Image (cartoon, rainbow, N blue to C red):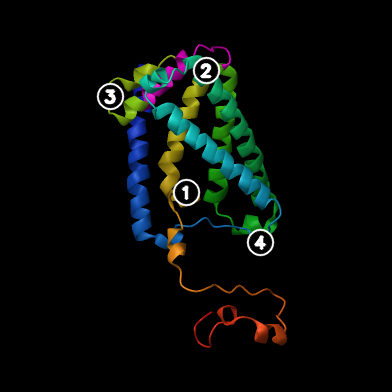
Amino acid sequence: MNVMNQFFFGVYPYIALAVLAIGSVIRFDREPYTWRTGSSQLLRRRQLVAGSILFHLGVLMIFGGHLVGLLTPVAVWDALGVAHSAKQLLAMVAGGVAGVMMLIGGLLLLHRRLFDPRIRRTSSFGDTAILIILLIQLCLGLSTIFISARHMDGEEMVKFMNWAQGVFTFRAGTADYIADVHWLFKAHIVLGLTIFLVFPFTRLVHMLSAPVWYLNRRGWQLVRSRRQMPVSRIASAPASIRGRKGDGR
């Protein structure tokens, strides 16, 4: 058991993070045209807006909470006068709210992908699989709230903080910090690391992109509807919208 603990929480994090970093760089360099979200909005808009907003807001809140909560040194929280129990309660409440938002949004998106024939035909196995894995990971995370509620002293939270910070600072014996925590926490961590591992090979890579190049875009992009615009309206439209002949707009 100790060997398994050392591997999954002392070695596996570095394997997952290395594949995440190197794999993402290689994919962006060798297959840039696969670096996309693969949106299905044109096939069916229903459920997408509500589901996407709830899902992505929940993801951002959870990711930000984990990042700040786990990687901020314990000494900083102590200097700010934030008790460990108060920090744990905040993490449970904020994480619970964000988790429910992400769960509702994720179920709406999964329903579209599984039960709309057109979307299902255009979806790859990876598109559906990664969404299911994210929802399983979310359910594991929400389940840990009930385990944390039994111990409100905040000491377990400190264990996870020491483990996460130990991984990023290459501290020896990091896996020992969480050797005795509940198996649900361990399953949540291992699946989270596995998501990092498969990240470069899925559509999740779009999370690393920011469309800053739009700020330097020249001219307008004209999107035409199926219904043809009357000639009189085209003639009276501004030149910036009509576009000049041969300019591609």
Identify the element where label 2 is drawn: helix
Residue indicated by mark 3: 171
Q: Amino acid at mark 1?
A: Met
The N terminus - image quarter: top left
Q: Which residues are magenta?
A: 149-164
1 or 3: tag closer to the N-terminus: 3
For the residues bearing labels 4 and 2, Cβ distance under 8 angstroms: no
Where residue 12 sits, quadrant-wise, is top left
Distance, label 4 to label 2, CA atoms, is 46 Å
Residue at the spot of label 4: 43
Measuring 33% from the left and 53% from the top, which residue is drawn there?
26
User: Picture coordinates of residue 115 (x, y %)?
Assistant: 70, 50
Q: What separation in Å lies between label 4 and label 3 (alpha carbons)? A: 49 Å
Label 1, residues with CA under 10 Å away: few <14, some 14-19, many ≥20: few
| Residue depth check, mark 4 versus mark 3: number of the one nearer the observer | 3
- Residue 249 occupies quadrant: bottom right
What distance separates the C-alpha of mark 1 from that of mark 4?
Answer: 22 Å
Pointers 3 and 2 in contact (CB under 8 A)?
Answer: no
Q: Position of residue 39 (x, y in %)?
A: 57, 57
Q: Nearer the viewer, residue 216 or 156?
A: 216
Using the image, determine if residue 69 lies above or below residue 127. Answer: above
Q: Is residue 150 magenta?
A: yes
Q: Nearer the viewer, mark 1 or mark 4?
A: 1
Q: Is residue 243 left or right of residue 214?
A: right
Q: Between marks 1 and 3, how big is the CA–CA gap? A: 29 Å
Residue 21, image quadrant: top left
Q: Which residue has dot 2 on it?
A: 86
Pick whichever of labels 3 and 2 is earlier in the sequence.
Answer: 2
Mark 1 lies on residue:
207
